[in-house]
Image: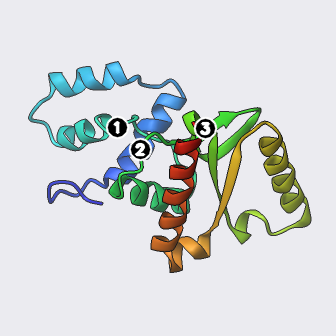
Amino acid sequence: MRSDGGDIDLVLLELVVAEASQRRLATDVELRHQVELNPGKRGVRPLRRVLDIPGGPQRTRSGGERHLLRALRENEFNGVEVNAKIHGYEVDFLWRDLGFVLELDGWDGHSGSVAFERDRLKIAKLDAAGLTVMPVTGRQLRDDLDGALDRLRRALAFHREKT
């Protein structure tokens, strides 16, 4: 995703801004102040766009997460936190108000029995804490993104009706 015909990748810029915030290298207030001080400088417009993302810039850890986050935004899925902490675990995508988690489930992260067992335990513990966990595989994202988004949309609508 390029901005305004320029050469700045907004997804990568969002990753940098979110990482800087996570590491406490720059706050949202500090970055917005720099935007105000440098209105005509190259890169300020894309930075403003990233700072104005609803819910703020999100920190992603993989290409799959970035791909899904972009698709969620393009399809107006709101209220999601990425790589959020809950009940002692970090989850890929969290709708905290609904108690709903989407976990990307790829072979690259589960290529051994230890990783497989660890993730099954994580899901069981989150389930026991009252959360619903929906796994989505990398292949589903790649080969049937619309189907994955449709299932997610229906699951979120179900959880909204329950609350």
Name the residue: 21% across, 28% down: 35
Q: Position of residue 46 (x, y in %)?
A: 23, 44
- Label for residue 54? 1
Name the residue: 56% across, 51% down: 158
| Amino acid type of the residue that numbered disc 2 sits on in the rendered structure | Asn
Mark 3 and 1 residues: CB-CB less than 8 Å, in contact?
Answer: no
> In the picture provided, is 108 more to the left or to the right than 144?
right
Name the residue: 36% across, 46% down: 13
**Which residue is nearer to you in this view: 47 or 79?**
79
Q: Is residue 46 above or below residue 163?
A: below
| Amino acid type of the residue that numbered disc 3 sits on in the rendered structure | Ala
Image quadrant assignment for residue 135: bottom right
Q: Position of residue 124 (x, y in %)?
A: 84, 48
For mark 3, does the 10 Å Cα neighbourhood hold few (<14), some (14 to 19), or many (20 or more) residues? some
How many numbered marks appear? 3
- Label for residue 8? none
Mark 2 and 1 residues: CB-CB less than 8 Å, in contact?
Answer: yes
**Which residue is nearer to you in this view: 98 or 56?**
98
Is the N terminus in the top left, top right, bottom left or bottom right quadrant? bottom left
Q: Furthest residue to the bottom?
A: 143
Q: Which residue is mark 3?
A: 84
Q: Which residue is mark 2?
A: 78
